[in-house]
Amino acid sequence: GAVVSQHPSRVICKSGTSVKIECRSLDFQATTMFWYRQFPKQSLMLMATSNEGSKATYEQGVEKDKFLINHASLTLSTLTVTSAHPEDSSFYICSARDVGGWSYNEQFFGPGTRLTVL
Amino acid sequence: KQEVTQIPAALSVPEGENLVLNCSFTDSAIYNLQWFRQDPGKGLTSLLLIQSSQREQTSGRLNASLDKSSGRSTLYIAASQPGDSATYLCAVVGDGGATNKLIFGTGTLLAVQP
């Protein structure tokens, strides 16, 4: 149990285009999901907290108009990178908090999405 | 501001050796601590979660300990195998668990030589 999927796993796009990344909890409900960014050989940095049915909470320094987050259901959160530029190239990882399982408060991570902006 | 540090940054050991990875955090008021494994280009796999009231957790060859007062956690791997090669990350949740935000450490890159 506690599986989180991400789609796509890899995307290459031209500068100026928008890219949507999906994060799904497959076998549990997640009222809260998190989006992280990871640069090569660095640790994960939290970008925003996605709350089902309400606005996302962004970390300091993260542009909310550039990284649009929608958490429309208990199993799906999307991150849209708008007008992507080469500096947005990174590994984006989501996680979901399983509030109903035995492992209360444990976060389960998706496999990540590698974004390359040309 | 919570800061999480992991030592060593990289470690290479021969197969079969027991090893310890270290994690330290500056604010002892944590809600829980979690150890993860990350393979190259992949997401994170949760290994162990220790609640703030617990001292240790065990899963197979893995044992994680937590000393809140000193701001330290260790991950002990027994009888290491080449398949254990990966980056190991520790992360803490503070804020009494209200936000459930994970603050990640810098990671330890482990290589187990056959």
Image (tube, coloured by chain):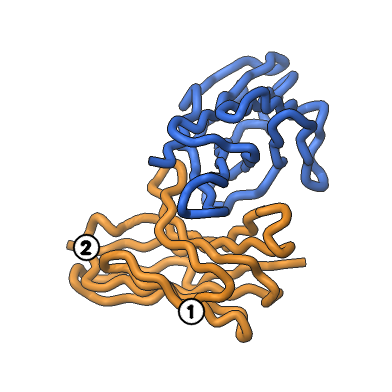
Chain colours: A blue, B orange
Residue B2: give x, y in percent of width and height. Answer: 72, 67
- Of badges 1 and 2, the one in the foreground is 1
Q: Is residue A97 left or right of residue B62?
A: right
Say the numbered circle drawn on residue B55.
1
- Residue A88 place in picture, x, y as percent: 67, 31
Q: Quadrant of the C terminus of chain A?
A: top right
| Mark 2 closeness class: few <14, some 14–19, many ≥20 residues within 10 Å | some
Residue type pointed to by label 1 = Arg
Quadrant in which the N terminus of chain A appears? top left
Q: Position of residue B78 (x, y in %)?
A: 26, 73
Please indicate whether residue A46 sits to the left or right of residue B76 in the image: right
Q: Nearer the viewer, residue A47 or A11?
A: A47
Give the secondary structure at mark 1.
loop
The disc label shown at residue B81, or none: 2
Q: Nearer the viewer, residue A85 or B34?
A: B34
Identify the mark nearer the N-term, 1 or 2. Answer: 1
Label 2 SS: loop
Chain ID, mark 1: B
Residue B97 in the image, given as x and y percentages of width and height: 68, 59
- Up-down relation of residue A14 to residue A106 (above or below): above
> Considering depth in this image, is A94 or A99 the residue closer to the camera?
A99
Q: Residue at image x 67%, y 77%?
A: B28
Q: Chain of mark 2?
A: B
Image check: B63 left or right of A116? left
| Residue found at x 46% / y 27% | A9
Q: Residue furthest bottom?
A: B70
